[in-house]
Amino acid sequence: MKRAPEKHLTLREKILENIRDAIISGSLKAGTKLSEPEFAERFGISRTPIREAFRQLESEGYLTIVPRRGAIVREFSRKDVEDFYAIKSILEGYAARCACSRLTEKDINRLQAINDRLSELAENGDIKKIFRIHNDFHELFIKAADNEKLRELIMSLVNRFQRLRLTSLSISGRMQISVQEHERIIEAF
C-alpha cells in the first residue's frame, strides 16, 4: 500500500501551528500576552519568524498586536460572535442562492458525501480533520456561486474568525447540529 507523502512544514508554519493549537486548546488563554523573545528562545530561533507568525495569527483573529506592548491572545465578545455569524449567514446565504442553478448532481452528491463523513467524525473525530472537511462543504457551494469577489469576502471573513469557528465546532453536540443543518442545505439545493 502506497503512503501519502508527508507534508513538510516550514519553521514559520510549525510555529504558527504550535501557537494556534495552544490558543485553541486553551493553554494560551484570552488576554495572555505573548513575548517574541520568549518564543524565540523556546524555539531556538530569531525573533523574525516569531513576528511573522504573530502577524499571521493576528490576521486569523487569534491575536491582537498592540504597538510597544506586544501580542495578546484575542478575546471575542458576545457582540463579535453575533456580528460574525450574522454577516457570514448573509454572505453564505447569497452564495447558496447563486449556486442553486449551477450545482450539478455530482456536486450535490459530493456535498452529501462530505456531510456523511462529518457525521461519522462527529462522534469522536479529530477536530482539525472535522474543521477541514467542514470547510470543504462550504467551499463547494461557495465556488459554485461563480462570484470571485463574494468568495474572497467570505474567505477573508472566515479566516479572520477561524478560531471562533473551530472553537464552536469543538463544543459537545455542535457538530451533530451542523450535520443536520447541512442536510437541510442539501435538501434545499
Image (cartoon, grey):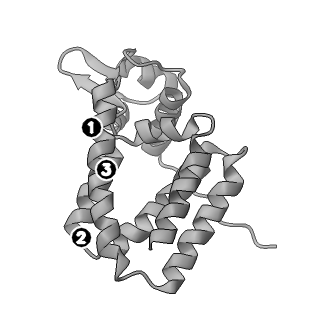
Whether the residues at callouts 3 and 1 have beta carbons within 8 Å, the answer is no
Between discs 3 and 2, the one toward the N terminus: 3
Asked whether residue 51 is in view, the answer is: no
**Percent coordinates x, y for residue 97 in the rendering:** 31, 70
Q: Earlier in the sequence, mark 3 or mark 1?
A: 1
Q: Is residue 60 left or right of residue 2?
A: left
SS type, badge 1? helix
> Which numbered disc, 3 or 2, marks the residue closer to the eye?
3
Kind of residue at disc 1: Asp
Viewer-nearest residue: 22 or 10: 22
C-alpha gap between disc 3 and disc 1 = 8 Å
Q: Which mark is residue 148?
A: 2
Would you say 173 lies left or right of 160 here?
right
Q: Which residue is mark 3?
A: 88
Q: Position of residue 23 (x, y in %)?
A: 48, 27
Is residue 17 placed above or below 147 in the rendered structure? above
- The residue to which callout 1 is attached is 83
At label 2, the amino acid type is Glu
Q: Amino acid at mark 3?
A: Lys
Which SS class for mark 2?
helix
User: Which mark, residue 137?
Assistant: none
21 up-or-down from 86: above or below:
above
